[in-house]
Amino acid sequence: MSIPEKKLEGTRLFPLKQKKNPIAAFENVKKNYDDVQVLKGVDLNISPGEKLALIGPSGSGKTTMIRMLMTLEKPSSGHIKVEGKYLWHKEVSGGLIPANEKHLREMRQNIGMVFQHFNLFPHMTILRNVTEAPIHVLGLSKEEAHQRAVDMLQKVGLGDKLDAYPAQLSGGQKQRVAIARAVVMQPRIMLFDEVTSALDPELVDEVLQVIKDLAKETDMAMILVTHEMDFARDVADRVVFLHDGQIEEEGKPKDIFENPKSPRLKSFLRRFLKS
Amino acid sequence: MSWDWNFAIEVFPEILGAIWLVIAITFGSFIVALILGLVLTFARRSSFKPLSLLVYAFIEFVRSTPPLVQLFFVYFALPAIGISINKYTAGIVTLGIHYSTYVSEVYRSGIEAIPKGQWEAAKAMNFSKTQTWFRIILPQAIPPVIPMLGNYLIVLFKETPILMAIGVGEFLQKAQLIGSTHFKYLEPITIVGLLFLLLSYPSALLINRLEQKSNQAFTGKKNRRLTNQFHLKSGA
C-alpha cells in the first residue's frame, strides 16, 4: 500500500539527513572581486544525498558558491571542505598548505557540474562528449565507457543522437547531453548552475524533467542554483535563500515558499509569484 | 640582348632539379616552426614569470632581426663557440626558428578564441592540464588557423632563396651559377620567378579553399556529406 503523497509533506519518515557528516561544507567563506565583496561569510553544510536549492536575486553570490566548490574560483578567505577534507588546502602534519594540482584533481573526482551555457565540446560527437572523461580520467575501458554513456544518453532521451555534433542539437538537447556527461563520472555532488536560464522557454521543461527524474533515483547530493521556483519546491529537500552575499533564510521548501520570514525573501518571492 | 628560347629550354631542367631540395627545406623548416611554435606558445603562457618573460623577449628579438643575419649567425658565427652544423641543417634551423615566432602568434590567436567555458568544462570533467590542451583546446584552436599557417608556409617557401647566401643549391643559386657561366641572366632568373609563381599560386588557392572549409567546422560533417549525396542522387 502506498501512502498518499500529501501526508508525507511536512513529516519525515527518516530523520534527519542533516545529522550525517556533511559531504560538503562552507565555513565562513568570503569572496572578493577587487573591492566588491560577493560573499560575506557563508556557512553551509550539505549532507550526502541531499538536494539543495540555492535561490536569490542575481548577484547574490549563488553561482560563485558552486563555482568555488567546483574549484573554478578560489575563496578569498574561509574554508570549503569536501568529505571532511579541505578543498583548497592540503593538511600537512597539522598545518595547512595551499593545494597543488594533484590534490585539486583528487578532490574534483567527487564533484560534477552542469553549466548555464552547456559548454559541450563542439569538436566531439555527443557520444564522445560523454565517453571522453570516463576513458581518459577514470580509466574505464572503451567498451565500459561506451556502455555507460549509451545508457545515460538513452535515459535523457538522446539515444538516437550519439553521432550528432553539439551544433546540430537544440539548447534543451545540449543541456541534457551536458547532464549525461557530468553524471557518467558518478560524482558524489552534482552542481547545476542556472541550467535553464539560457534556454528558450519551450525547452525548459524537458531539462527540468530530466533533473527531477535524476534527483528521484540518485543518491548523489545535488546543489541547484535556479530561478525556477516551482522546480526548486518539487526537487529540493532544503532551500537556501542567498541575499547580498549572505544566507538570509533557509528551510524546507514548504516553509520557505509558504511561510517566508525575512522581508527580503518575502519581496523576492512576491516578484516571482507575480509573473 | 633578347630572350633566347633555346637557352631557356636548355637550362630549365637544371634549375628545376633543385625542386626537391627546395621542397624538403620548406617543409623541414615548417615542421620545426610548427613544433617549436607550440613550445613557445606553452612557455609564453607559463605561470612561471621568468620563463614567460624570457620567451617573450626571444620572440620579439627573433621577429625584429632579419632572417639573413640570423642565418649568417647560425652558419658562420656559431662555429666560433664550437657549434658547427652543415648548411642544410643551418638553413632549416634558421628558417624554422624564425617562423616559429610567427606560428606561435597564430596558435595564440587560435587559443584565445576558445571560450572560457571550454576550460571550465574541462576542469569540471577533471581532465589533467595536458589532456585539456591536447584533447579539448588545441583540437578546437588549430583548425580555424590552418589557413593562416598555410599562408606562412608560402611565405616561408618564398624566403628559401636567402639560403643561397650560405651556398645551398636552391633555385636562385642554380640560376646565378648558370648566369655567371654563360653571362646570360635573363632566362635563368625569369625561370626562377616563374617556378615560384607556379608553386605558390596553386598553394594559395588550396589554402583559400581550406579557409572556406574551416569556417564551417563542427557544424555536422556527417549531415553535410549526406546532404551532398542526396543532391547528387536527385540531380541525376
Image: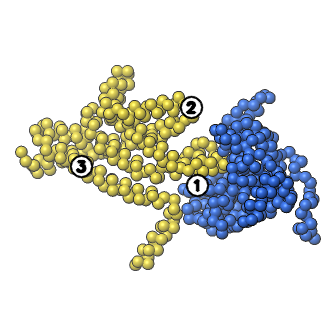
Disc number placed over residue B195 in the picture, else none: 3
**Circle 3 marks a residue in which chain?**
B
Relative side of A215 to B220, left or right: right
- Mark 3, other Cα within 10 Å: few <14 / some 14–19 / many ≥20: some
For the residues labelled 2 and 1, the Cα–Cα distance comes to 29 Å
Query: Residue at 42% of width from left, 74% of height from top?
Result: B232
Q: Which residue is mark 2?
A: B48
Q: Position of residue B43 (x, y in %)?
A: 51, 35
Q: Position of residue A256 (x, y in %)?
A: 83, 57
Image marks 1 and 3: residues in contact by CB distance under 8 Å:
no
Relative side of A104 to A15, left or right: left
Q: Amino acid at mark 1?
A: Phe
Colour applied to chain A = blue
For the residues labelled 1 and 3, the Cα–Cα distance comes to 44 Å
Secondary structure under tag 1 reads: loop
Disc number placed over residue B125 in the picture, else none: none
Q: Amino acid at mark 3?
A: Leu
For the residues labelled 2 and 3, the Cα–Cα distance comes to 47 Å
Are discs 2 and 3 both within one chain? yes
Q: Position of residue A255 (x, y in %)?
A: 86, 58
Secondary structure under tag 2 reads: loop
Are discs 1 and 3 both within one chain? no
Compare residues B61 and B5 and report the one nearer the observer: B61
Q: Quadrant of the N terminus of chain A?
A: bottom right
The correct choice, above or below, for A160 with respect to B104 in the image is below
Can residue A159 be seen at all in this image of the molecule? no
Looking at the image, is mark 1 or mark 3 nearer the viewer?
A: 1
Disc number placed over residue A121 in the picture, else none: 1
Looking at the image, is mark 2 or mark 3 nearer the viewer?
A: 2
- Mark 1, other Cα within 10 Å: few <14 / some 14–19 / many ≥20: many
